[in-house]
Each structure stands twice: as structure tokens, then as C-alpha cells.
Image (cartoon, grey):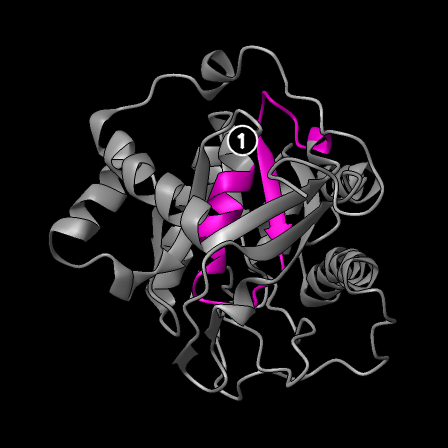
Amino acid sequence: MTDETSARGGGPVARPEGRWRTRGHIPFPLWLCILVVYPVASLLFRLRYRHIERIPVRGPVLLVANHVSVLDPLACARLVFDRGRIPHFLAKETVFKGLAGTILRAAGQIPVARYSSTARGSLDAARADLQAGNLVVIYPEGSVTRDPAWWPMQARTGAAQLALTTDAVVVPVAQWGPQRVHDYHSKKLHLRLRTPADYLVGEPIDLSALRAEIRSGRPLDTPLLRETTDLMMTRVRHQLAELRGEPAPAAVHPGPGRSRPDGIAGSAA
């Protein structure tokens, strides 16, 4: 099975027309990222997409994904780029060091100072990005899952804050396969070329009722944020179960014990 082909029994995924036009203007720093990420992702992964057409080609999109490897942002970036969009990731601040960090910032990527009160600015930056009509990729778990079987762990509420305070289309995405190349749990790199990496894009999540309640005065409190977070991650877990061909466990791994007082999540780590 080749790139951009549905993983099980489906026909070829339709290529949207005018993908260069829907990507918009690409500044030089972003070109540098593309010239690195695109071939590396092609060498490491044999990408297989299901329902890539569910990602809107225009307008604000909040793409909510599970996190299985430090390398899965490469494959996820290809998914978004192949759809005709430019991904803007929230990534841990330590990635933004030196020349590479300067390039990433200029390419529109968003640093997250995890476990810090300054992380609030990351959400503000992501919100502004969505309001400008861009596509933001966020990992609600905040880091690679600590679940021994790679199921999504307990998520933070930063993604819910973005979902409820913008008009972005919220698209759940399940990914499976990049952990075979880099195992975060064992800290081992298994360098295999063209390792299958499967992506299942879900139907956009309808948050119109909750957004209407907020506009009517409902406070953006912890129960509402947790309700929205669980809604998003339940969809991602079900999609991952479909990709893996096995049911998701009822229990959710609690994740790292270190608390984040501001509820920020979403960094690629």
C-alpha cells in the first residue's frame, strides 16, 4: 500500500485541487522546515491516511491528536501538508534553541514553557493563530503517552480552552506507528525505513451548543473544560482502537504526576 492510500480496503484518497493555493504564502523559514521534514518523513514512514478529506482546506482548524512518539510530529506534519495546509504545532520550549529555534519561530511554530505560568501565553498565541485562519496541531496529553500499551493518557485542558473560545473546526486524529521507530518508553531508536504510520481523521466535533452556552454567560470552569477534553479524547481513543483493530481499555493512564497549575497542554515532546 502506498502513501495517501486508505489503510484497509479503501480506494485512493482524493487529492484536493489547488493545494499550493490553500497552503497560502510560504515564507523562507517555513520552506527550510519543509525541505527537512518532507523527505525525512518520507524515508522514515510509509504514510497511510484514512479520511484526510475531513481536514478543511481553508479556515481555522484545531487538529487534536494522540501522541505516541517524539517523531510523530514529522508524520503528522506530512498529513497536514499533504492535505494542502500548513501545520502550526505547539511544541516544548526546549526545542526552540539556537538557530533551529529561530527558524521554527519564524515558521509559525508555537513554543510552550511547560510547567510554568508563562505557558498561558502559548495558548494566547495559538488562539491568535486560529483567529487568523490557520491550522494548529495540539496534543492534549501534553507529552508522549506513558501508557505501556500506547493508549492516550489523561489529557490536560488547554486544547479544550482553545476549542471553546474560538470558532475553529475541531478535528480529532488518531495516529499509530511512529512509536515503532522511536520508543519513548525504552528511549530506543529502531531505525527502519518506510515504517507504516497510520492516520485516521475523524469527523469534526460539534461544539456549537457548548460555545453557545459560553456566549450566554456559562463560565469556562474546570468541569466544562474537563467535559470538553474528555469528549475530544474519547473520539481520539475510539479512532485509535479502529486503527489498531482492538478495543481501547476502559481505564485511562493518569500520565506524569507533575501538575500544571494553568492546565496548559499540547506540546510535542
Left/right of residue 63 with respect to residue 223 in the rendered view: left
Residue 70 is covered by the magenta coloring: yes
Residue at x-position 37% and y-position 52%: 121
Q: Which residue lies furthest to the left in this view?
A: 98
| Percent x, y of residue 81 | 49, 32
Name the one closer to the observer, 248 or 217. Answer: 248
Give the magenta-colored segment's residue range.
53-79
Q: How many marks?
A: 1
Left/right of residue 127 with respect to residue 201 in the rendered view: left
| Percent x, y of residue 175 | 64, 57
- The part of the image, by quadrant, that contains residue 178 is bottom right
| Percent x, y of residue 196 | 60, 56
Name the one closer to the observer, 110 or 212. Answer: 110
Residue at x-position 25% and y-position 43%: 105
In what quadrant of the picture does the C terminus appear? bottom left
Q: In this picture, is 63 found above or below 73? A: above
Mark 1: which secondary structure?
Answer: helix
Residue at x-position 81% and y-position 39%: 206
Query: Label 1 is placed on what type of residue?
Result: Asp
Residue 102 is covered by the magenta coloring: no
| Percent x, y of residue 265 | 51, 63
Q: On the image, numbered disc 1 is attached to which residue?
A: 82
